[in-house]
Amino acid sequence: MLYKSYLIEQNFSSLKSKIALFYGENTGLKKEFKDTIKFNNKNKEIIKFQQDQILKDENILFDEVNNNSLFGKEKLILIDNADDKILEILKEIGKDLDSVKIYIFSEILEKKSKMRNYFEKSTSFGIIPCYQDNETGLKKIINSKLKGYEGLTPYNVNLIFENCDLDRSKLLNEIQKIKIFFDKKKIETIDLQILLNIKSTDKFEYLKDEALAGNRIKTNKLLSQTIIESEKVMYYLNSINQRLDKLIEIYQSDKKNLVGIIDDLKPPIFWKDKPKVVEQAKKWTLEKTKKMREKTYNFEIYIKSNSIVNKDLLVKKLIIDMCELANA
């Protein structure tokens, strides 16, 4: 019998099969299911096997199924790293299974897998595919696990999501770190970046965004935490100029709806940057943006004509000037 994994996530008790197979590439989801099984059965004796142990001596599985627990508890059996080799043993066990439940965990099982096909067609055996998560699913997990946290903005949700590489296990570890670090349930973007160990080029992007938004406190804090590398000066400058050019393009548009203008820009603004671009567009004017663009032009000429200068300090001064002009 085939079960949908999201339904079992929502209500594990809806899994009625006494022998159930969890398979697929999503190790994080399988771990969650395993944790749920252990949590829901704390009063039972849980026996764990690797498939190889059973293949060497199948009697160890039959003995556990047929004999009462030494502790007078109900039994639950977990079998890891299973594949088609154990199918015949499971079919035999399933003929006369009373109170014991057996949960089996496998890696990817192809469509031609005998065990997968048998479990899918069986009315008494259950099978739960654990496919790879997508962006929507992982963001739902973030919002669910961190529900009630102040500062869980779409921007911060994106930071957490982008740091997990579509890996649920990594995401759950990051969420646990966030819960420990932000024990007062208030998430600060800058502290979140540090906690997630965002790389230096990404940190500069956040610094640039806060300066363009005129956020003095956040800009100053990020300036003290971001390493400005001299050899990346042109990268920093190009990043600032690209955003300034986008703002100029926005102000020169004939349209009146700001969000609509941003949505129509070519090349498009990356979706995660749109909230910041909206914030910045409300802070700047065409005149101020052109003035800042002139500053960056002069900065580039000065850098290229003076090889012996402290480039990192000059970049920081440019950032400060930009933040001040945003507030002018």
Image: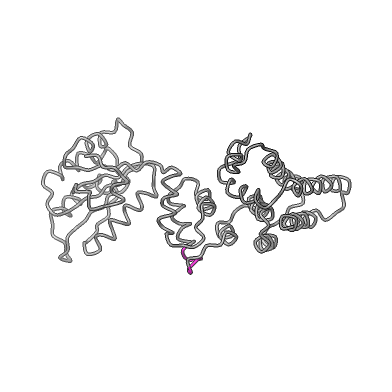
Front in this rendered view, residue 237 or 39: 237
* Residue closer to the observer: 325 or 302: 325
Residue at image position (27%, 47%) is 104
Q: In the rendered view, how is the structure colored?
A: one colour
Q: Please say if 72 is above or below 171.
A: below
Task: Name the residue at 33% across, 37% down.
Answer: 109
| Residue stretch rendered in magenta on the structure | 179-184
In the drawing, does residue 231 fall left or right of residue 166? Answer: right
Measured from the top left, where is residue 14 in percent x and y?
Answer: 22, 50
In the rendered image, residue 253 lying in the magenta stretch gets the answer no
Spot occupied by residue 298 in the image (x, y as percentages of width and height): 84, 47
Q: Residue furthest bottom?
A: 184
Please indicate whether residue 250 sits to the left or right of residue 288 in the image.
left
Q: Quadrant of the C terminus?
A: bottom right
Residue 34: x and y, percent? 31, 54
Q: Position of residue 115 (x, y in %)?
A: 25, 37
